[in-house]
């Protein structure tokens, strides 16, 4: 099976540090307002000497795999979407992070784009449809014309969008703007990204931790009630 996940032993094979340390560093970096050097210092206090660049490489190497493993337990979001874009600076240039939440504030999807136009908006909506497996009943946007045009043109390209209602409401979109803050509060202290692909991976990790904090995963079959984060992560990644 082409998409079969590696075993945990295979995933961490050849690493100089135990997998628990790698998972901890990646998790803390994505969740808390820590620089890579802060985290390296904290590990040094535990007797673990590692370079901040090592943690950076761990983030790039393991976030895509962690995301796949957690997504096996993801709950579907609701079908009333609030969509907006926020800004991320990469090598001194602004890029655009498309994001959507449902009416309960649950994350629907996200996508980092170098551009803010009709093509970028459509790419975001196609990604969201693939993730959720169903089109929304409604999409609420702000007044940005390109996103409105993208939604209006989607039904001609895919019939699954034909019953989706397009709305424009600054009031209803307050929810997504508030949700941006939870992601931006972690991204902004990262002191700027230098490479687009690295930014995309790191943001995917930040979004993953944001979804975990919002309880968007059904872990009932793993019987982890009351367990601490390290135990939960180990169970999810190993399942």
Image: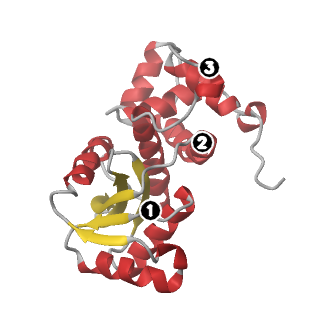
Q: Circle 3 — which element?
A: loop
First of labels 2, 3 by sequence position: 2
In front of the other: 92 or 149:
149
Evaluate whether residue 40 shows in this view: yes
Q: Residue at the spot x=58%, y=29% of the render?
A: 219
Q: Position of residue 197 (x, y in %)?
A: 49, 60
Q: Residue at the spot x=45%, y=80% of the render?
A: 154
Q: Residue at the spot x=52%, y=26% of the render?
A: 24
Q: Circle 1 — which element?
A: helix
Against 92, residue 74 (above or below) is above
Alpha carbon separation for disc pair 2 and 3:
25 Å
Marks counted in the figure total 3
Q: Circle 2 — which element?
A: helix
- Whether residue 54 sits left or right of residue 13 in the image: it is left
Residue located beneath label 2 in the image: 62
Residue located beneath label 3 in the image: 223
First of labels 1, 2 by sequence position: 2
Residue 167 got which mark?
Answer: none
- Whether residue 63 sits left or right of residue 85 in the image: it is right
Q: Position of residue 6 (x, y in %)?
A: 76, 41
In front of the other: 56 or 68:
68
Alpha carbon separation for disc pair 3 and 1:
38 Å
In front of the other: 22 or 78:
78
Q: Which circle, 2 or 3, is nearer the viewer?
A: 3
């Amino acid at each position: 099976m082409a998409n079969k996940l590696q075993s945990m032993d295979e995933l961490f094979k050849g690493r100089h540090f135990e997998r628990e340390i790698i998972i901890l560093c990646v998790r803390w970096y994505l969740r808390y307002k820590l620089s890579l050097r802060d985290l390296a210092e904290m590990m040094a206090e535990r007797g673990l000497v590692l370079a901040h660049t090592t943690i950076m490489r761990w983030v790039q190497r393991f976030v895509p795999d962690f995301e796949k493993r957690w997504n096996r337990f993801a709950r579907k979001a609701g079908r009333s979407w609030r969509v907006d874009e926020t800004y991320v600076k990469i090598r001194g240039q602004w890029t655009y992070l498309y994001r959507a939440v449902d009416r309960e504030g649950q994350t629907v999807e996200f996508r980092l784009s170098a551009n803010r136009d009709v093509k970028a908006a459509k790419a975001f909506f196609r990604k969201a449809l693939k993730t959720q497996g169903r089109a929304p009943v409604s999409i609420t946007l702000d007044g940005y014309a390109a996103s409105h045009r993208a939604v209006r043109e989607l039904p001609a390209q895919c019939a699954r969008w034909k019953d989706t209602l397009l709305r424009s409401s600054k009031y209803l979109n307050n929810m997504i703007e508030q949700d941006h803050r939870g992601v931006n509060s972690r991204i902004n202290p990262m002191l700027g990204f230098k490479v687009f692909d690295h930014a995309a991976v790191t943001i995917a990790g930040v979004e993953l931790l944001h979804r975990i904090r919002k309880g968007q995963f059904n872990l009932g079959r793993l019987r982890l009630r009351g367990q601490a984060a390290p135990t939960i992560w180990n169970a999810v990644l190993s399942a």
